[in-house]
Each structure stands twice: as structure tokens, then as C-alpha cells.
Amino acid sequence: MTTILLQPMGAVDVDLISFLHDELGSLFGAVEVRPEALIPEAARVPGRGQLAGGLVLSALPAPEGAEAVLGVIEEDLFVARTNFVFGLALGRKAMISLARLRQEFYGLPPNQGLLRERAKKEAVHELGHVFGLPHCPNAGCVMRFSRSIRETDFKSSRFCGRCLKTLESSGVLARS
Ligand SMILES: [Zn+2]
Ligand SMILES: [Zn+2]
């Protein structure tokens, strides 16, 4: 069984954390929600209104006793040479930002159902990287890279057959 630590960075939508807890739990095995952690001040870039994703990621606690840690943050993230990222992953740590998954970001009325669906896709995608999957050329696969929210909405929250086989053969997912 694969255990994932779910780590809110700063104050994060409680409904969304409990949704991710249930969804990731039924997909991967076990999820443990950690108490809120502080956002590292060094990650705040003056005048940019965004946080440096790599610094937030490295501030995540090590996934002791678990296979992966997934950080969730409300603020918008960027990494070098990008305007923004929906998420990032390195080693056993992964991170997603909710900022651009909210309809409000695009001047639209809030939609919690859509937020949940998008957050699930980005969370599964980043955890897929932690478990060794590269980006996938399959159009509907959750491991397809998304550059825009439209691309996130287009893909599904599921692994395609090929990605699923890789995860099953490495023991991350149980064979069904
Ligand atoms: Zn990716
Ligand atoms: Zn795939």
C-alpha cells in the first residue's frame, strides 16, 4: 500500500483538502493529512505576487514513513523560465497551487465542483511524477502536460493504460 502525506502550506480550503484526502486515498491506498505548515518567507518574491515553487517545495517536510508528500497551497507558483506552474515535483515531494484552478482567477463565479476536479487532476499528475512517470502523449491521460487551464480541463483525472501498467509493475498501484 502506498502512503501519501497531504500537507497544507499556509491556510488552505478545508473542503478541498478533505476531498483530496478521500480521492487520493481511494486511488493510491492511504493518505494522511498533516497540520498546516508555514510558507517559507524566502519564497515570496517582492513585486511578483507569486511564490518561488522550488523554495516552497524544498520547505515541505520529508515524507517520513510514507512514499510521497503532496503540498497544497492557495498562492500562485512559478519556477525559473515560466510565468506560472500548476504544480511541480522533485524526488518524493510534490506540490500543487490552487490559485489558477479557481474560476475567480479568470474573473468567473466560484465553482467548487470544478475546483475539486482540477485539483484532483493536478495532484494525481504531480504524484505520477513522484512515482516515476514522465509526461504522456496520450490525449486524455492525467500525465499529459497542461500549459493552460483549458488543457487541464480537457484531460481526465485517470492514468491511461500504459501509465497504469508502469505504476502497477513498480508496485505503486495494486493490480486490479
Ligand atoms: Zn508534469
Ligand atoms: Zn499516460
Image: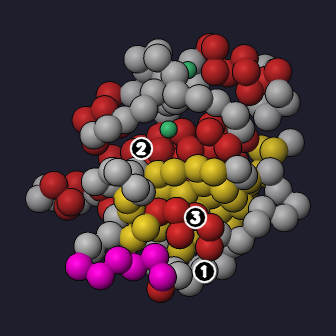
Residue picked out by circle 2: 117
Q: Quadrant of residue 1?
A: top right
Q: Is residue 46 left or right of residue 13?
A: left
Magenta-tinted stretch: 42-47
Instruction: Measuring from the top left, give residue 132's x and y in whole percent.
Output: 70, 34
Residue picked out by circle 3: 57
Instruction: Measuring from the top left, give residue 74's x and y in whole percent.
Output: 40, 69
Residue picked out by circle 1: 37
Categorize mark 1 by other alpha carbons within 10 Å: few (<14), some (14-19), many (20+): some
Secondary structure found at label 1: loop
Secondary structure found at label 3: helix
Q: Amino acid at mark 3?
A: Leu
Residue 101 seen from this side: no
Of 25 and 94, the residue lying toward us: 94
Q: Is residue 10 shown above or below 51?
A: below
Q: Residue at x 51, y 22 (%)?
A: 136
Q: Quadrant of residue 175?
A: top right
Q: Is residue 97 left or right of residue 172?
A: left
Q: Main secondary structure of the magenta part?
A: loop
Between label 3 and label 1, give the one nearer the viewer: 3
Q: Residue at x 35, y 51 (%)?
A: 81
